[in-house]
Image (tube, helix red, strand yellow):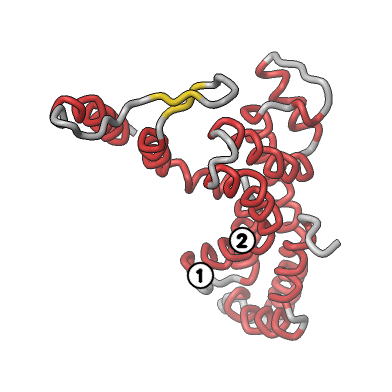
Amino acid sequence: MIRYLLVALLAIFSLFAEPVFAADGGITAFTLKENADGEKEYTIRLQVLAIMTMLSFIPALVIMMTSFTRIVIVLGILRQAIGLQSAPSNQVIVGISLFLTFFIMSPVFKEINDTALQPYIAEEMSSKDAFDAAQIPLKAFMLQQTRVKDIATFADIAGETFDGPQAVPMHILIPAFITSELKTAFQIGFMIFIPFLILDLVVASVLMAMGMMMLSPMMVSLPFKLMLFVLVDGWNLVMGTLATSFGVGT
């Protein structure tokens, strides 16, 4: 974090220093323009600097404000339930989670692009208005997946009150959304874990009845769990369950 702050400070210093070095007719970097309604706005170059500085927060935004958290946790629990240590690998799980997140979040991203990004690029909307417009579809998605109890918990901690769900500020909605996603992911993971656990218990009981106590039940049950998962078309069921849990296709 300190390294990012130093880079940002150096970049800001270079912005202020540039007009000195470009005194012979160079382009100044730090300027303000006034819109028709009298609102002042920073130049595009300064906005690009702010965006580049915030790039380090993009992974956190993708992970914590979308469906990614629930998906990656469920897939990790599924791998543990089957008994596989490295198949699928972490890279494959993250890749599946990322592209399934794009699939689930595509209506939200499309609405953000249509209502905020494109009008801002066309200079039909100020950066502040575009930011406010981009929050609306993302906030609606997060409110749909967040439990009222979790929102109330963080509102009580912050000591804030608000009228209705649409008035929930983002600094309260985001941790409440993350808490709800964690609970939902573990609930789905529990339901996935049960049939594999039953199969492990059955294999362990059979091995004990046969007197084969030195043989690992996990090693014997692994092929049967893989066969069961393939026969029921497990990947289709898991992916479909994760998508429909967010209301996709319903």
Return the mark for residue 21. none
The residue indicated by pointer 2 is: 102
Q: Position of residue 173 (x, y in %)?
A: 68, 32
**What SS does tag 2 mark?**
helix
Is 79 on the left or on the right of 107, as rendered? left
Front-most of residues 244 and 36: 36
Residue plotted at (70% across, 83% down): 230
Task: From the viewer's perspective, tell me whether residue 78 is left or right of residue 206.
Answer: left
Residue at the image position 57 percent from the left and 78 percent from the top: 219
Is label 1 or label 2 in front? 2
The residue sitting at 78% across, 31% down in the picture is 166
Q: Quadrant of the C terminus?
A: bottom right
Which callout, 1 or 2, points at the residue further toward the start of the chain? 1
- Marks 1 and 2 sit apart, C-alpha to C-alpha, by 15 Å
Tell me the element at label 1.
Answer: helix
Residue occupying image coordinates x 68% and y 78%:
225
Q: Amino acid at mark 2?
A: Phe
Local crowd at mark 2 within 10 Å, few (<14), some, or many (≥20)? some
Disc sitting over residue 92 in the figure? 1
Q: List x then y, in percent, for residue 68.
A: 61, 54
- Kindly identify the amino acid type of the residue bearing the numbered disc 1: Val
57 on left or right of 163? left
